[in-house]
Each structure stands twice: as C-alpha cells, then as structure tokens.
Amino acid sequence: MYGRKPVLEALGDASLVVDKVILADTARGQAAAEILQAAKAAGVAVQRASAHRVKVLAGNGKQDQGVLADVVAPRMSTLAAALAGKRPPSRVLLLDGITTPANVGMILRTATAAGLDGVIVPRRGVAALDPMVVKASAGVAFRAPVLRCGTAREAAEMLVEAGYGLFALGASARSSVFDIELPQRAAFVLGAETAGVGDEVGELVTEWVSIPMPGDVESLNVSAAAAVLSFELVRRGTAR
C-alpha cells in the first residue's frame, strides 16, 4: 500500500496488521510526522529508504508520495493448502493471463463482496499483487480470499484432479452462465483482457459459458464479467 492517506488509514485500522512502514529519507514536514506518530501509536516499525527505492517498491513513482506499508493479508493461502483443508472452497475464480492491475484489484473486491470462497491468482502470467492492485481494490485485497499457485495451468490441473467442474467464460459459448447446472464444487476461469482463456487451461475446461448480451456489444471488460458471474452465484445462493 502506498501514499500518505492510505498508509495513515491502514495504521489506524485495528482490523489490519501492518508489518512495517517504509518512508523515503527525503520525507519531511507535517505529513511525515503524522505517519511516524501513527506508526508509533500502532507499534509498527518504520524503515527509512531512498526516494528511488520507495518508488521501485511501490511500482508507481507518481503517486507513492514517499511512503508505503507492508500489510498482512490474513486470508491469503496456497491453492494446495485450500484443497487439502477440511472445508475445501466450493466456488472459486481462476485468473488466467489477466495482466492489468486495475482488473485484478476490481475482481478481488467484487469476489470478496460476493462472498466467494477464493480467487486463484497465479504467480506467473497474472499481474503481481502489488500496491496498484491494492489501490484498485480500494484496500479489499488485504481481506480477499486469495489462493496462490505457480501458473493457471497448474491450478486447473489441481482443480480437475480434486473433482471440480471447470467452467470458462467465452463470448461465443452457447451455454449461458445463468442457466448452467453447477456441481458441488466449481471453478470459473477468467481469461486475459484481449486473448481470453489460454489454450493450456482451455483444454481442461469442463464447459464454456457466456454472458448473454442482447445489445450490440461484443464482450465485457473482464472485471465486469467477473461481477456478473459473482453475483449470479449470490442470486443462486451458491457463492459459498
């Protein structure tokens, strides 16, 4: 998380655990003093670093304002651990090739709001869970049920082996997301912004589904499609 106001809000949020704050050595004045005071009150360590280092860590040199914070994500786990647990997730999203941080962040916010059991965010081929994703999620990324694995293909194989139905969103699919019958455990693949679901994952898909669009529009933004899907699961009462 970066920026003075977001970091101050995180330090003042009793529901969040802040591991540390990194403040640029050029940061001075009232804003820096407020952050130091808030960190001290919360018992959080503050490290000083060069302004360049802060920009590199934040990944957004224009908006970091010389400060960032590492915040613990309590619901983050590995996909392997979730599948091996006593109560494996029943409804999950799998991100495949989504590289725009804003889309990943908005999907995390939507899925969390809808009460889905997990969003699988592979370490490779998908936007990193960095401050830009956190900002796009409006901070919800810290509370999102994020499940990690190496690649989307690896996740798809693990899900199929565990008995999940694997449904992929595709604009040309004949089956409607509103009509399909779902098994007890189902995973929904959301593909890249332009290329869609990749072939490596596509060959493992149980069924392709689409969102009916009577209007003259070819497709929805992937985060909008995720919202439609997530709240269709809420409507069915099967989000969890």
Image (spheres, helix red, strand yellow):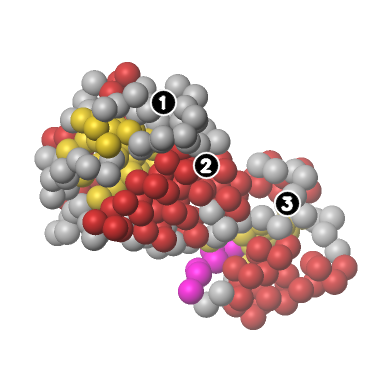
- Label of residue 103 in the image: 2
Image-quadrant location for residue 186: top left
Image-quadrant location for residue 189: top left
Relative to 171, 7 lies left or right: right
Earlier-in-chain disc, 2 versus 1: 2
Crowd band around label 3 with a 10 angstrom C-alpha radius: few (<14), some (14–19), many (20+): many
Mark 3 → mark 1, Cα distance in angstroms: 32 Å
- Label of residue 196 in the image: 1
Q: Residue at x 40, y 31 (%)?
A: 191
| Amino acid type at mark 2 | Asn
The x and y percentages for residue 225 are 42, 41
What residue is disc 3 on?
64
Relative to 73, 58 lies left or right: right
| Amino acid type at mark 1 | Gly
Earlier-in-chain disc, 2 versus 3: 3
Crowd band around label 2 with a 10 angstrom C-alpha radius: few (<14), some (14–19), many (20+): many
